[in-house]
Image (cartoon, rainbow, N blue to C red):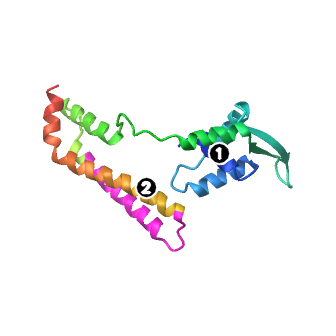
Amino acid sequence: MSTRHVLLGLLTAGPSHGYDLKRRHDERFPQARPLAYGQVYTTLQRLVRDGLAEVEGTDADGGPERTHYRSTDKGSVELAHWLGEIAPPAPFVTNDIFAKVVVAILAEAAGEPADPAAYLRAQRTAHMARMRELTALKTAPGADLATVLSADYALSHLDADLRWMTTTAGRLAALTEEIRNV
């Protein structure tokens, strides 16, 4: 996810300070990793540097001084361009699970204590636990639509991983043979 563009999108609602942008990001993208304050302020500084946002003013409201930012016309054009881009499917799949299976096969062949089948079983257990958490989250009374859709997205990806793990477990002997003979 492009933090730069998400913050520009959040600024379309009007001028905001970094703390408010972080809070709104975390509310709007409940399943995403929460933004760190440092990331928000660094990104805002870059947006200002690049002319995509500007400082609207500062206030204290009885607390620490807060700088308010607003999107510029150039920022609106940049956001519109980004929103119009189609996200291309990844040309290469880089997957930690697959990498660990292959490395476990290599390590096992070298006499190291590694068991690719046990790793797949443990990973499957972890995926199933996460799927139960997400299902509970999306079916909780009062769950908002953003939470439901975000959970559905994650569940679909976890389900695809589970199907891949099942297929790979069934082909593990052939994969081991192929890797050892390369």
Q: Reply above or below: 135 against 3.
A: below
Residue 139 image point, x, y percent: 45, 70
Verify whether residue 137 appears in magenta.
yes
Q: Is residue 22 left or right of residue 173?
A: right
User: Among all residues in the image, which is located at the extreme bottom?
Assistant: 141
Residue 116 image point, x, y percent: 23, 42
Residue 55 image point, x, y percent: 79, 40
Helix or strand or loop: what does disc 2 sit on?
A: helix
Q: Magenta residues?
A: 119-145
Classify residue 178 by image quadrant: top left
Mark 2–mark 1 distance (CA, rounded to whole Å): 22 Å
Residue 143 image point, x, y percent: 52, 68
Helix or strand or loop: what does disc 1 sit on?
A: helix
Q: Quadrant of the C terminus?
A: top left
User: Among all residues in the image, which is located at the extreme top?
Assistant: 182
Classify residue 105 by image quadrant: top left
Q: Tell me whether the residue at label 2 lies in contact with that at label 1, contact meaning CB atoms closer than 8 angstroms.
A: no
Q: Identify the mark at residue 29; answer none if there is no mark.
A: none
Q: Amino acid at mark 2?
A: Tyr
Residue that appears at 33% across and 55% down: 159
Q: Is residue 22 left or right of residue 94?
A: right
Judging by the rendered image, the residue that carries numbered circle 2 is 153
Residue that appears at 52% across and 65% down: 145
Q: Amino acid at mark 1?
A: Leu
Q: Badge 2 local density, few (<14 within 10 Å), some, or many (20+)?
A: few
Judging by the rendered image, the residue that carries numbered circle 1 is 7
Verify whether residue 36 appears in magenta.
no
Badge 2 or badge 1: first in the primary sequence? 1
Q: Is residue 28 left or right of residue 67?
A: left
Residue that appears at 25% across and 35% down: 102
